[in-house]
């Protein structure tokens, strides 16, 4: 089932992006990547059957929270629901709950465990 998953990773740090993409590809996941929220929104609009979006919160220009909000608005108009996960090094305790309250399905704390990410994504599918 993993190779059927199409996941959009949004990460502005080139090293972190490479690690995320390679780690998921090693697990036979189809990964699409974006370096900022604008590129991610464009990909989101043009890509069918996304299993999930995983985004860093601190992105240049538009942060991951605003990007998630815009994706959620598009979901309503398209009649779809795609799990969107925050990925950050800066969420602990209450902050993690706040991300969920504003619309993220879950939060992954860096450094992330990619097996746990896939397990969580499959839970939401």
Image (cartoon, helix red, strand yellow):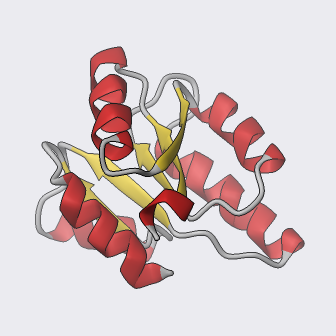
Residue 56 in the image: above or below residue 92:
above
The residue at 36%/16% (across/down) is 14
Residue 111 in the image: above or below residue 104:
above
In the image: residue 120, left or right of residue 67: left
Coordinates of residue 84 in the picture (x, y in percent): 50, 62
The residue at 55%/62% (across/down) is 4
- Residue 20 position by quadrant: top left
- Residue 15 position by quadrant: top left
Report if residue 109 is visible in the image.
yes
In the image: residue 11, left or right of residue 72: left
Most extreme residue toward the right is: 77
Residue 31 in the image: above or below residue 70:
above
Q: Nearer the viewer, residue 31 or 10?
A: 31
Residue 117 in the image: above or below residue 19:
below
Coordinates of residue 17 in the picture (x, y in percent): 36, 27
In the image: residue 89, left or right of residue 10: left
Report if residue 52 is visible in the image.
no
The residue at 21%/60% (across/down) is 115
Coordinates of residue 24 in the picture (x, y in percent): 34, 45
Coordinates of residue 80 in the picture (x, y in percent): 75, 75
Most extreme residue toward the top is: 14
Numbered disc total:
0
Q: Nearer the viewer, residue 31 or 107?
A: 31
The residue at 31%/49% (across/down) is 87
């Amino acid at each position: 089932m993993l190779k059927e998953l199409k996941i959009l990773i949004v990460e502005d740090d080139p090293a972190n992006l490479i690690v995320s993409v390679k780690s998921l590809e090693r697990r036979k996941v189809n990964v699409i990547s974006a370096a900022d929220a604008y590129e991610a929104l464009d990909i989101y609009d043009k890509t069918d059957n996304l299993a999930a979006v995983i985004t860093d919160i601190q992105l240049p220009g538009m942060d991951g929270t605003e990007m998630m909000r815009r994706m959620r608005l598009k979901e309503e108009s398209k009649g779809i629901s795609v799990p969107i996960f925050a990925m950050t090094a800066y969420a602990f305790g209450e902050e993690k709950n706040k991300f969920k309250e504003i619309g993220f399905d879950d939060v992954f704390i860096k450094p992330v465990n990619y097996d746990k990410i896939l397990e969580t994504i499959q839970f939401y599918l």
